[in-house]
Every structure is written in structure tokens, then in C-alpha cells.
Amino acid sequence: MNFCTPATKKGSRPSSPEFAELAAKPELTRADLIKLLSAKAEDEIEAVRAEAERVLLAECGNGVYLRGLVEASNACACDCLYCGIRKSNREVNRYTLSLEDILSCARQCAEMGYGSMVIQSGERADKKFIDLIEEAVRRIRIETVSEKQPEGLGITLCIGQQTKETYQRLYAAGAHRYLLRIESTNPKLFAAIHPAEQSFESRVECLKLLREVGYQVGTGVMIGLPGQTLEDLADDILFFSTLDIDMIGMGPFIPHAGTPLGDLPCPDVAERLRLAFLMIAVTRLKLRDVNIAATTALQALDPIGREKGLRFGANVIMPQMSPTEVRADYQLYPGKPCIDENAKDCQSCLNMRVEFAGRKIGLYAWGDSLHARKRQTGGGHG
């Protein structure tokens, strides 16, 4: 795949009028989404990409917002059939960061000008861990206040399904965004990649609870799963729209040998990347003003995958901030990039990646999605 090379630089004219016209429609139907996701020729892909980039710049601007990613624990109570840290994987060296570890990462985020951070972990709801996250959130919001960031770091949580009471506690402590990926919105496909005790309905209910509590809500899917169709992917986008989702994190499925899905046939790497980039673009065309992440899974399969993600309509990157010594223990999929780099190395790398994509980093900004700011009264944070 040669898209996003100098041959498709900014301002180049798409050479597929059919796909350019379709991508520019103000209201996209399910059939339109399926057609756009079917783009295969380079001129077709470029037509979709160019319109998605145009919409992004017009709706959201040129900024790329950074979320310093802290992987607080790889202990997990779930047994998802695709995940490298599933509870049945006995080869994983389990860890949980201390409060001081998490706070140290947060201070680094603030010092480097990252306006926000993400606290991510395996799914666990035990009291000790929730108490730790609650205290970390509360302390981060207090201790990262500065002249440049008078309200401290913005905080996104990604720690799985919880009770409404827990969501409320963490929101009251100072978290204001929550990412809960659903992985597939086809109930049958969801069931095929999760054990029976993890239900599609409970996942959807948690997304609704998060909105009730007051969070900006994020979700996302894996792309290129065994048995997944273009219709499934189009329905994923419609699900994002129906639930009024504020932020999306999507990436290509990467089989992990230590999981039940590791040996099942799936599309080849080039096909999974094609679909992943198109999902970013078509989601941008449909949802317009949401935040969309260029995920590390893209870079795991393509050395410039995150830059391409930005060119296809993404506007968020999550640089690694976890202590270097635990990064190799948090591998949801093989080939995870940035395992050996420290936070400063990641910063230099990201600056170059964002510049390569022709964009600017939004320093000292929470980077709330425009979609959320429009919905909320009293505006939002730049």
C-alpha cells in the first residue's frame, strides 16, 4: 500500500470521482458506508482519505492531542479470547504500579506539555485496585496544576466494566473521559471472541451508564477479526453514531499466539491495514467532530502507521508513559512498539511523526472532542 506517500500529499486531486463524490455526501447511509469501506484501488482509497482529512481540518482543526498512556496493571479478571493479558495466560508476569509510579508518570506528562493522560489496565474491579485508581486520579488533578494548565491534566480512564457507583466515584475524583472498547457491535461476533460470561448487552449498558454519570464516552472495535464483514464494520460506525460516542479508538486485529484466536484465519496484514485506515476515514466522514485515535496497533503493523492514521482523519495519539521496565509485560498483541523507549524518546519520535503528517501538537490542552463540547453546557477545554 502506497497511500500517504508523496504521491498522495496534501492538496493532490483524488483520481476516483465516484468515491470522491460519495465521500462528500452530507448524510451517509449504511450502503454508503459499506461502499466506502470497499475501496481497494489506490485512487479510490485516496479519494476517501482526502475527504476525511478535509472534514477533520474543517471540523476540528489541525491539532493533534496527546494522551500520555500509563498502563497501571496487567492483572485482568477477564478471559477475552484475543487478548495477550487474558487471565488464563500463565506466561504473563503480572504487575500493578504503585500510587507513586502513577503519579510520577503524570508529572512527566505535565512537564512534557501533554494536556491529558490515559490510565489503562486489565479489567478488574477489586476494591484495592479501584481505591488506588481513585486516589491516583484525585492526586493527579491536584498535583499537575500549573500556570499553563490551571485545571491540571485531563484524565481518561480505560479500566473496563464497573458498577455505576464506581464510575461515579472515579468521576467525582476528577476523571472526565472513559474509554470502554466494545471490539465488535455484532452480538454474534462479540460472543465468538469472548467467553460466555462476558455479554454484549452488559458492555452496551456500561457505555450508557458512563454517559449518565457525565463522562465523555469512548469506545472502539478491532478490524479484521476472523469472520468479520464490511457490513459488520459499517454497523460499528452506525453504533458509534446511535450511542452519540465522543471518542473512538480502533485498530487492526493482531493475532496473539497465546490466545484461542491466535491460530484462526484472518485477513492478511495489508488487508487489515487497508480496512483499519478506511475505518478511521469513514468514521470521520460519518461522525465529523469526534476524537479518533491513531493507535499503536497501526504502528505495530506499519512503521509509519500512526502517521497514516492522522492523514486518514485521526486527531489523537497516545504516547507511552509507562515505566520502561513493565512495558514488555503489557502486550495485548505481539509486536507492540516503543517497549524499549523512555518517555523522552517517545516525545521526540512523536514530534517527528506529527510533523511528517503535516499537523501540529496541541500542547497543554485537554483536547476534549468538539462533539462533546457541543453537547455540554458551558463549553469545554481547548
Image (tube, rainbow, N blue to C red):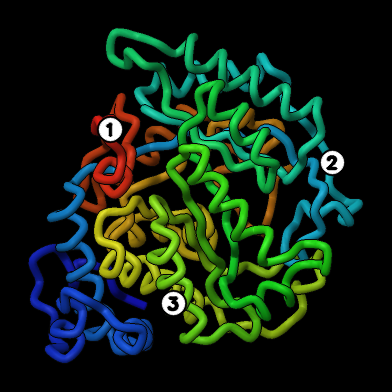
Give the spatial CA distance, label 1 vs label 3: 32 Å
Which residue is pictured at 60% across the width and 60% down the height? 204
Amino acid residing under circle 3? Leu
Residue 72 visible (yes or no): yes
Q: Earlier in the sequence, mark 1 or mark 3?
A: 3
The residue closer to the viewer here, 114 or 376, is 376
- In this rendering, the label closer to the viewer, 2 or 1: 1
Task: Give the residue pinned by disc 3.
Answer: 275
The quarter in which the C terminus is drawn is: top left
- In this rendering, the label closer to the viewer, 1 or 3: 1
Mark 3 nearby-residue class (10 Å; few <14, some 14–19, many ≥20) = many
Q: Is residue 321 above or below residue 27?
A: above
Which residue is pictured at 43% across the width and 42% down the height? 216
Which residue is pictured at 27% across the width and 35% down the height? 377
Amino acid residing under circle 1? Gly
Residue 336 drawn at (x, y percent): 60, 53
Numbered mark located on residue 93 in the image: 2
Q: Earlier in the sequence, mark 2 or mark 1?
A: 2
Q: Is residue 199 above or below residue 156?
A: below
2 and 1 marks in contact (CB < 8 Å): no
Which element is circle 3 on?
helix
Task: Give the residue pinned by disc 1.
Answer: 380
Which residue is pictured at 50% across the width and 43% down the height? 212
Give the spatial CA distance, label 3 vs label 2: 33 Å
Mark 2 nearby-residue class (10 Å; few <14, some 14–19, many ≥20) = few
The quarter in which the N terminus is drawn is: bottom left
